[in-house]
Image: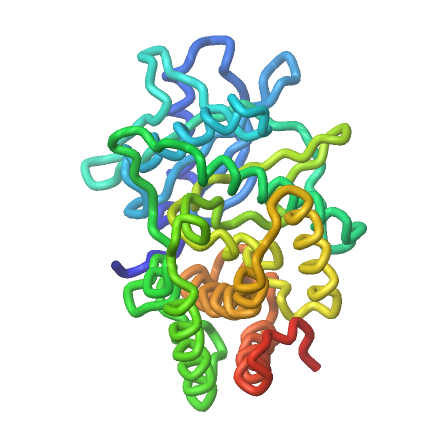
């Protein structure tokens, strides 16, 4: 597949679709729409007259199929039953949780309306213990994943080495990252060669590979009155459990405090699920693979707010991380 630049529709068209979708819900769920953010999808805030809020997600074209989104919602249902705080989808007047709406003869989108989840989003400026909370909640998700019997027809995206950073990767080609110099490509290629060998040895046993969030970083964590809540399961799919450790520091792997954050994440995780020596040893490889996956994402999403905010040095820092990984067989999480 060729990765698209988030959604090809402009904001006005997306707003029009959101308005059409909202009309299919009961009167008590109506409200004023405003765009919160655009990335893979467009997320709208629905502000109701009584002050309550909802979140409406307009999926981009050609990423998830209708039945795959239903599968995401099914997992969320099961997680809530175990007491994990995750989003809950609402139904239309026709009893649908996933709408498919046509904007015109050529454009249609899937839409889901969620209950709003209260909480404050932690940032890299907070106490590193936030990463311990992130690790702990991730471990609970993995515990659930390992024992959950998926229903018939369950289908989600696959995150393995090829679909992350291969020529047909879900997020595009890492070679298209803006500012990546021709002489740097060989460094990335050598890194990927080593990553491939290590992950081949690590394998995909059910203890190491299963249903994961796949994008569980601080921006998808909410803290509220002592509770830790997880949002945005749009990328959930089949992948290595330790990929979620790498995802925890997405985009900031080069930060001077990244090593400290990973250590706190591991401490929180292992309060729930002990990790083997093999699990711990593979984490630097997962981190560098994730960083290269993000190179691909930046290349295919270059105009998004997140990609623009990274600045011109981010790609250069990515190459430095690859070089350090090749030289040390570790992923030095701070580059000079």
Quarter containing the C terminus:
bottom right
Q: Nearer the viewer, residue 218 or 60?
A: 218
Q: Position of residue 118 (x, y in %)?
A: 66, 28
Give the residue at x 57% y 69%. 284
Q: Nearer the viewer, residue 178 or 69?
A: 69
Res 16 visible: no
Q: Position of residue 92 (x, y in %)?
A: 37, 16
Give the residue at x 28% y 61%. 2
Q: Position of residue 183 (x, y in %)?
A: 45, 90
Give the residue at x 44% y 35%. 147
Taking 330 as reference, is 234 above or below it?
above
Q: Is residue 243 toward the left or the right of residue 251 in the image?
A: left
Snapshot quadrant of residue 34: top right
Give the residue at x 42% y 52%. 209
Furthest toward the bottom, the residue is: 183
Q: Position of residue 39 (x, y in %)?
A: 47, 49
Taking 218 as reference, is 52 above or below it?
above
Taking 85 as reference, is 234 above or below it?
below
Quarter containing the N terminus:
bottom left
Taking 171 as reference, is 48 above or below it?
above
Res 151 visible: yes
Furthest toward the left, the residue is: 105
Counting labels gives 0
Furthest toward the top, the residue is: 27
């Amino acid at each position: 597949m060729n990765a698209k630049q988030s959604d090809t529709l402009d904001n006005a068209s997306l707003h029009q679709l959101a308005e059409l979708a909202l009309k299919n819900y009961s009167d008590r769920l109506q409200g004023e729409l405003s765009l919160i953010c655009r990335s893979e999808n467009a997320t709208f805030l629905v502000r109701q007259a009584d002050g309550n809020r909802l979140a409406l997600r307009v999926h981009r074209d050609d990423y998830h199929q209708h039945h795959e989104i239903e599968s995401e919602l099914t997992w969320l249902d099961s997680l809530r039953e175990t007491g994990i705080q995750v989003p809950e989808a609402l139904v239309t007047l026709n009893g649908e949780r996933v709408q498919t709406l046509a904007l015109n003869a050529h454009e249609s989108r899937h839409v889901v309306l969620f209950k709003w989840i209260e909480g404050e989003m932690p940032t890299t400026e907070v106490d590193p213990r936030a990463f311990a909370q992130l690790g702990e909640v991730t471990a609970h998700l993995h515990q659930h994943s390992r024992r959950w019997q998926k229903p018939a027809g369950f289908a989600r995206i696959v995150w393995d080495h090829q679909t992350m950073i291969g020529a047909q990767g879900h997020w595009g080609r890492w070679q298209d990252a803006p500012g990546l110099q021709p002489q740097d490509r060989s460094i990335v290629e050598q890194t990927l060669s080593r990553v491939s060998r290590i992950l081949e040895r690590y394998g995909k046993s059910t203890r190491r590979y299963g249903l994961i969030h796949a994008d569980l970083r601080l921006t998808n964590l909410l803290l509220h009155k002592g509770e830790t809540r997880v949002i945005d399961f749009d990328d959930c799919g089949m992948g290595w459990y330790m990929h979620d450790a790498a995802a925890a520091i997405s985009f900031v792997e080069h930060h001077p405090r990244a090593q400290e954050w990973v250590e706190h994440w591991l401490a929180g995780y292992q309060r729930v699920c002990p990790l083997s020596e093999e699990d711990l040893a593979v984490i630097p490889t997962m981190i560098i693979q994730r960083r290269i996956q993000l190179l691909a994402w930046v290349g295919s999403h270059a105009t998004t707010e997140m990609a623009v905010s990274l600045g011109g040095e981010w790609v250069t820092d990515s190459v430095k991380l690859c070089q350090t990984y090749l030289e040390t067989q570790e992923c030095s999480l701070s580059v000079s």
